Amino acid sequence: MTGTLLALVPEYGLWIVALTVLLGCLAVPLPASMLVLAAGAFAATGDLILWQVIAAIWAAYVIGDQLAFHLARRAGPPLVTRIRGVRRVASTVDRAESLLQRRGGLAVFLSHTVLSPTGPYVSYICGATGVGWAAFTLSAVLGAVVWTGAYVALGYIFATELEYMAELVTDVVGIVAALAVMVLCGIWLHRRSKRDAA
Amino acid sequence: MGLPDTRQSETLAYGNDVRLSDFTLALRRNWIPALGLILSAIVALWFAIGFVLDVAHLRGPRPQDPDLKEWMTPRHVVMSWRLPPQVVFSVFDIKPHVDKRRKLDDIADDLGITLEELNVRLRAAAAVWRAVHR
């Protein structure tokens, strides 16, 4: 499986990597980090050109983020209003909105770097809850720089160990995604248990 | 020190039962987040075990010349086998600037051999080159 995915990069070049990153920003489940790692490795071997790899991936990340943000900005508010209409979750939505307004920049940056599997959802939530475009874009662009730089550098440095590095990255992304779901379910369970007890 | 107070023991046991049944009841009422929590914990553990195994593999001894894989390119082989490009390109029968991003399974197809056979040919050529130059 890993070999088949890695083979896409020499076969189709940077286009497939950029497209995967862009769709990944819209929460389409694709192995973006693995392909970016491979692009870094093929830049090290001279099959791809390093500056083009960095520029294409970073641009795809930024465009994908903007698409997610603006899609949510258009479609999100009616959905948020409807969710707020449910009395028992209204206060939670208010709290989430207020938290995003205060600490949105940090949330966006973390979700675009160390917590990258959560990135698309944070972009959607920011768009839907009215987080300012400039604040979102600044953090998202910085996050994209760090994410792109880190994965391309890893691939570039460990080019001869690409297959193992790709599996390691898949493990790390899987752990982060599973922990994010665990935290969400834990908060959900805790709140409902508290409500039941009251 | 004497025998334990039977009533106290019963109360404790009853108290534990109450706590246990409260917990069970809370799980039953909120089974969706509880199930999500358990499943995501299992998935996290699965990936964590994979991570530890992969790190152990990376830290262990690895072959000097890794087996050829279908996704590799000639330049990747040059880098990972630490051979001069002309040795690799000659075995693969390709032109460096024209076919630089061809995958090895395509190269093996062009030569009418399998990837394993290509691997054997390259090992032989590498052994000859190293015998002469080292």
Image (spheres, rainbow, N blue to C red):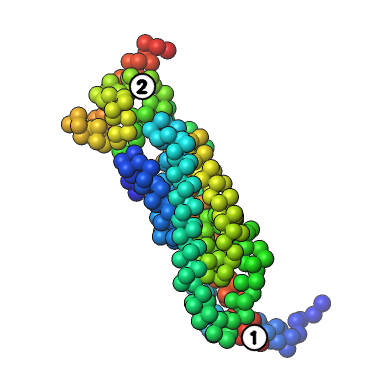
| Residue B100 vertical position relative to residue A85 in the rendered view, above or below | above
Horizontal relation, residue A98 to residue A18: left or right? right
For the residue pair B87 and A125, the one nearer the viewer reads as A125
Q: Where is residue A149 in the image (x, y as percent from the top left)?
A: 53, 42
**Discs 2/1, front:** 2
> Residue B81: percent from the left, percent from the top?
40, 26
The number of numbered discs placed on residues in the rendered structure image is: 2
Toward the right, the furthest residue is B1
On the image, the x and y values in percent for residue B94 come to 26, 25
Secondary structure under tag 2 reads helix
Subunit of mark 2?
B
Instruction: Give SS at disc 1.
Output: helix
- What residue is disc 1 on? A197
Residue B85: image tag: 2
Can residue A177 be seen from the camera position used here? no
Please give the name of the residue rendered at 31% of the width and 24% of the height, measured from the top-left corner.
B96
Taking the spot 62% from the left edge, 80% from the top edge, the residue there is A91
